[in-house]
Image (cartoon, rainbow, N blue to C red):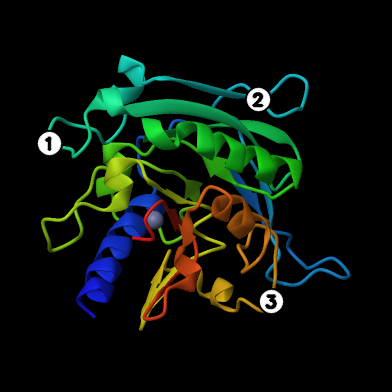
Amino acid sequence: MERTIRLAAALAVCCLAACSGGPAAPAPTETVTPAAPAPGRSPSDTRTTTLDDLPPPADGRFHSEIRRVPASVLARSTWNRRCPVPATSLRYVTVSFRGFDGLAHTGELLVHARAAEQLVTVFGKLFAQGFPIERMRVTSLAELNAPPTGDGNTTAAFACRPVRGRKAWSQHAYGLAVDVNPFQNPYHRGDVVLPERATSYLKRGDVRPGMIQKDGPAVRAFASIGWEWGGDYRSLKDFMHFSANGG
Ligand SMILES: [Zn+2]
């Protein structure tokens, strides 16, 4: 039970971090909701266009790069000297991803060095299988501290935050956890749903694009590197969350 409570608190923190939008966001994505559902479309369907934060792959194929974290990236991240990993243990990873618009885009992640290559293989698999992601970029301190917008949907890894109300760090603070499409895959515990406006996506049997499903492509891809899924937790559900140690 202790572990469960700790986990719940940790995940609540990480989700808040992942889902909050903030004034420092360099380039927004645009969500276009049809005025009336087209024939055959569910009223809950949205068509989301990803505006590029980074240049998309010119050839439309999967590309990746792993490098030490550039000073400019570190400066706009949540890292500081009190974080549980030195900056030298993090890597700046760029990977192609498929947007909800069907196009190839380039995303960025800060991850622990020992997970970098593995995570590239994960996102390579998701790209190959056409699993859509709205946006993927490094979480800024402003975003971390901003009031939640309720509709955040940034796929991200590193966020230097302790578990709320405790001294222990979230796995995100080590770069050893990734949240994927928080809006389609919310955190849910009791009355708490994060992002707040994502309640429609608690209906996990109503499968829509970008949702992570048990035995689906995302769970399989992360399982291939031994990472566990928050959708398998018992006392709460954190459908967006994958981590190296299950925490
Ligand atoms: Zn998480």
Could you tell me which residue is drawn at 84 percent across and 65 percent down? 38
Nearest the camera: 16 or 237?
A: 237
Residue type (three-letter) at the residue carrying disc 1: Arg
Question: What element does badge 1 sit on?
Answer: loop
Rendered image: mark on residue 193? none
Rendered location of residue 174, percent (x, y) = 29, 42
Mark 1 vs mark 2: which is more N-terminal? Answer: 2
Q: CA distance from mark 3 to mark 2?
A: 32 Å
Packing grade of label 1 (10 A; few <14, some 14-19, many >=20) is few
Mark 3 vs mark 2: which is more N-terminal? Answer: 2
Question: What element does badge 2 sit on?
Answer: loop
Rendered location of residue 225, percent (x, y) = 53, 47
Q: CA distance from mark 1 to mark 3?
A: 42 Å
Q: Is mark 1 within 8 Å of ligand 1?
A: no
Ligand 1 shows up in which quadrant of the image?
bottom left
Furthest-bottom residue in this view: 190
Q: Are marks 3 and 2 in contact (CB under 8 Å)?
A: no
Quadrant including the C terminus: bottom left
Based on the displayed image, in which of its 4 quarters is residue 86 positioned? top left
Q: Is residue 101 visible?
A: yes
Rendered location of residue 151, percent (x, y) = 47, 58
